[in-house]
Image (tube, rainbow, N blue to C red):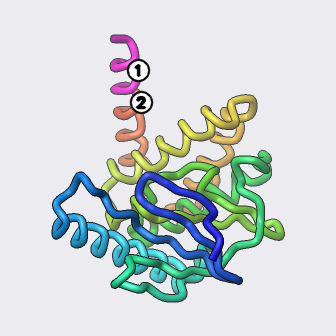
């Protein structure tokens, strides 16, 4: 089993055609609380992945969840991280994919191109460690705002055009009326500008 990397919450391993995500123990937490948190979060992440996969979204196929080890086994997507291979043409498919996810009531929580993989022209969404269920306009707006900031940070030279293309595709796919989401988006951006001015 090959270690691919560490995140703040998990270690990622590769084993043949599988990716294994193992939640890391936190020594600063009481053992029983840590055990319960890791178990609940890992199970929730696995269930969301399975729900999205079975609903037809481009996500890794979840294979199994090993509760005793807090491990999620999933299909390995052999492709390139979008953070390193992003192009404007990807913006529309990303916008539609995010809308499809939100239509299913799932908030990703960490929408960045680092959590997307491109394989054979298709964009796959990965890492659902911060994901949760919600249909609230404010939660949806927060997800979109996160992605906008990620584009600005990582792909600044094309971010305005990319975000506009992504948002147009999103609006064409989202089932909810966008007006409520847009109101919260503007509120979030206004709060951000206010905080940055102090």
The C terminus lies in quadrant: top left
User: Which residue is under mark 2?
Assistant: 189
Residue 196 in magenta stretch: yes
At which x and y percent is residue 129? 42, 63
Q: Which mark is residue 168?
A: none
Q: Quadrant of residue 63?
A: bottom right
Question: Which residue range is magenta in the image?
Answer: 190-198
Which residue is at a point 52% across and 86% down the rendered structure image? 54
Residue 181 in magenta stretch: no
Residue 188 lies, with reference to residue 24, above or below; the image says above
What's the distance in space between the residues labelled 2 and 1, CA to CA?
6 Å
What number of labels is visible? 2
User: Which residue is under mark 1?
Assistant: 193
The N terminus lies in quadrant: bottom right
**Contact between labelled residues 1 and 2, with CB atoms less than 8 Å apart:** yes
Asked whether, in this view, residue 100 is left or right of residue 32, the answer is: right
């Amino acid at each position: 089993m090959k270690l691919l990397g560490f995140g703040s919450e998990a270690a990622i391993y590769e084993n043949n055609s599988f990716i294994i995500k193992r939640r890391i123990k936190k020594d600063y937490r009481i053992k029983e609380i840590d055990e319960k948190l890791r178990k609940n979060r890992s199970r929730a992440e696995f269930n969301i992945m399975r729900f999205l996969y079975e609903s037809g979204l481009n996500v890794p196929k979840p294979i199994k969840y090993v509760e005793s080890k807090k491990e999620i086994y999933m299909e390995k997507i052999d492709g390139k991280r979008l953070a390193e291979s992003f192009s404007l043409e990807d913006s529309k498919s990303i916008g539609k994919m995010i809308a499809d996810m939100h239509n299913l009531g799932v908030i990703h929580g960490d929408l960045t191109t680092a959590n997307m993989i491109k394989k054979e022209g298709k964009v796959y969404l990965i890492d659902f460690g911060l994901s949760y269920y919600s249909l609230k306009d404010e939660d949806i707006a927060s997800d979109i705002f996160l992605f906008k900031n990620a584009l600005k940070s990582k792909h600044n030279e094309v971010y305005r055009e990319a975000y506009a293309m992504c948002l147009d595709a999103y609006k064409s796919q989202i089932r909810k009326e966008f007006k409520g989401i847009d109101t919260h988006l503007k509120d979030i951006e206004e709060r951000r500008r206010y905080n940055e001015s102090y």
